Amino acid sequence: MRSQRGFTLTELIVVVAIIGVFAAMAMSLGTENRATARAYSNTIVAELDATRMRAVSSRRWHRVNFDAGGGGAAVQAANVTGMSMPQTEGDWSDIGGFTSPNQIQLVALALSANLAPIGTDPLQDDGFGDHVFFAPDGSSAARTIYLSDG
């Protein structure tokens, strides 16, 4: 009798399965590292547009509160309908939110739609006490959100 050398079919299947698991893990880890400020800005625009549409459809004020430390935002709706803006914090309820990727940082929120002049940067965490408001008719005041990907 001659002894045969090689691998059994079961051993080969186990090795291929392990390689598949490692490949899936590598692909999911790589996705987070490819996020950019431009891609996240598109996400913010989509979330703001969805919030505006919710304000119009529900006839309630909505606002988005950006958080510099957490890198995300909370979406809130007024507890009452109508064009009168709620005046106290108790008049708002959380309805959702979104977070930024790990390497994207919210830098500042300006109360205008103007870009900072070339060579000047807004102060870190400037303007985060303010909110982006949407009236029940869909109107809003201009804001500029500054992001950094480094």
Image: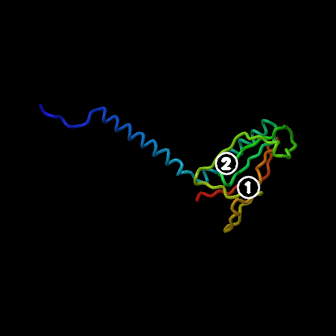
Q: Say which quarter of the image contains residue 6.
A: top left
Residue 86 placement (x, y as % from top left)? 85, 44
Contact? badges 1 and 2 (CB < 8 Å):
no
Q: Give the Cα separation between the discs numbered 1 and 2.
A: 15 Å
Judged from the image, the secondary structure of the residue bearing numbered disc 2 is helix
Residue 51, compared with residue 111, is above or below; it is above
**80 shown above or below 41:** above
Dot 2 surroundings within 10 Å: few (below 14), some, or many (20 or more)?
Answer: some
Location of residue 36 in the rendering, given as x and y in whole percent from the top left corner: 58, 53
Q: Quadrant of the N terminus?
A: top left
Using the image as rendered, state which of residue 85 and residue 45 is in the foreground: 85
Q: Is residue 11 left or right of residue 129?
A: left
Q: Residue 30 in the image: x percent, y percent?
A: 49, 48
Q: Residue furthest top?
A: 1
Residue at disc 1, secondary structure: loop
* Rendered-image quadrant of the C terminus: bottom right
Three-letter amino acid code at the position of disc 2: Ile
Residue depth check, mark 1 versus mark 2: number of the one nearer the observer = 1
Tell me: 16 left or right of 136: left
Residue drawn at (38%, 41%) of the image: 19
Say which amino acid is labelled 1: Phe
Query: Residue 64 shows which numbered tag?
Result: none
Question: Which residue appears farthest toward the right when viewing the image?
Answer: 84
Q: Is residue 92 left or right of residue 43?
A: right
Q: Residue at x 68, y 65 (%)?
A: 121
Q: Specify the farthest residue to the bottom.
A: 119
Between discs 1 and 2, the one toward the N terminus: 2
Tag shown at residue 128: 1
- Say the numbered circle drawn on residue 44: 2
Residue at 69 percent of width and 61 percent of height: 124
Residue 58 image offset from top left, x and y in percent: 79, 36
**Residue drawn at 76 percent across, 51 percent down:** 131
